[in-house]
């Protein structure tokens, strides 16, 4: 029970990280905020607040979100597994890049292994050219 002098809970950096990961995983699944909200029993505005980190996600709601997104709860938290944890942080950083989820979806739809390797070589080549231009 709140007392008159109780300090309101502040949203933390971890709350922000959880929200960002909800957004990335929702988009990767191809769900709108409204669709995710409907599936877990909240409005799209509430999902928006979770994703931008202005509202905390309670444990039971996070459990529902993981069920809908079909990911383990650990997906929303940084790992203490050294290199594996760093890779997870980097992967989520990449997935926040505009167009990254679309690129991955399109790449996954290419069935021909050789064509997939050629697309990857093309993307790497473009990235290398860009790096050379920047130096």
Image: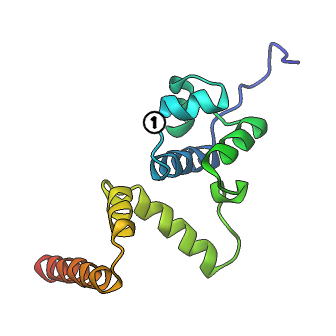
Q: Quadrant of residue 107?
A: bottom left
Residue 98 at x, y percent in the picture:
31, 53
Q: Quadrant of the C terminus?
A: bottom left
Q: Residue at x 48, y 51 (%)?
A: 24
Left/right of residue 76 with respect to residue 122 in the rendered view = right
Residue 39 at x, y percent in the picture:
62, 32
Left/right of residue 114 with respect to residue 91 in the rendered view = left
**Observer-nearest residue: 48 or 11?**
48
Can residue 109 be seen here? The reply is yes
Looking at the image, residue 105 lies above or below residue 9: below
**Observer-nearest residue: 129 or 121?**
121
Under circle 1, the secondary element is loop
- The extreme top residue here reads 4
Looking at the image, residue 67 lies above or below residue 76: above
Q: Residue at x 55, y 32 (%)?
A: 47
Residue labelled with disc 1 = 32
């Amino acid at each position: 029970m709140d007392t008159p002098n109780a300090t309101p809970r502040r949203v933390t950096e971890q709350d922000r990280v959880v929200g960002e990961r909800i957004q990335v995983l929702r988009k990767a699944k191809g769900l709108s905020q409204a669709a995710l909200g409907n599936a877990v029993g909240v409005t799209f505005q509430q999902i928006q607040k979770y994703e931008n980190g202005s509202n905390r996600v309670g444990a039971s709601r996070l459990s529902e979100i993981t069920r809908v997104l079909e990911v383990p709860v650990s997906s929303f938290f940084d790992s203490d597994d050294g290199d594996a944890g760093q890779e997870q942080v980097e992967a989520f950083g990449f997935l926040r890049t505009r167009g990254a989820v679309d690129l991955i979806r399109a790449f996954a739809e290419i069935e021909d292994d050789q064509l997939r390797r050629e697309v990857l070589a093309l993307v790497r080549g473009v990235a290398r050219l860009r790096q050379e231009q920047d130096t």
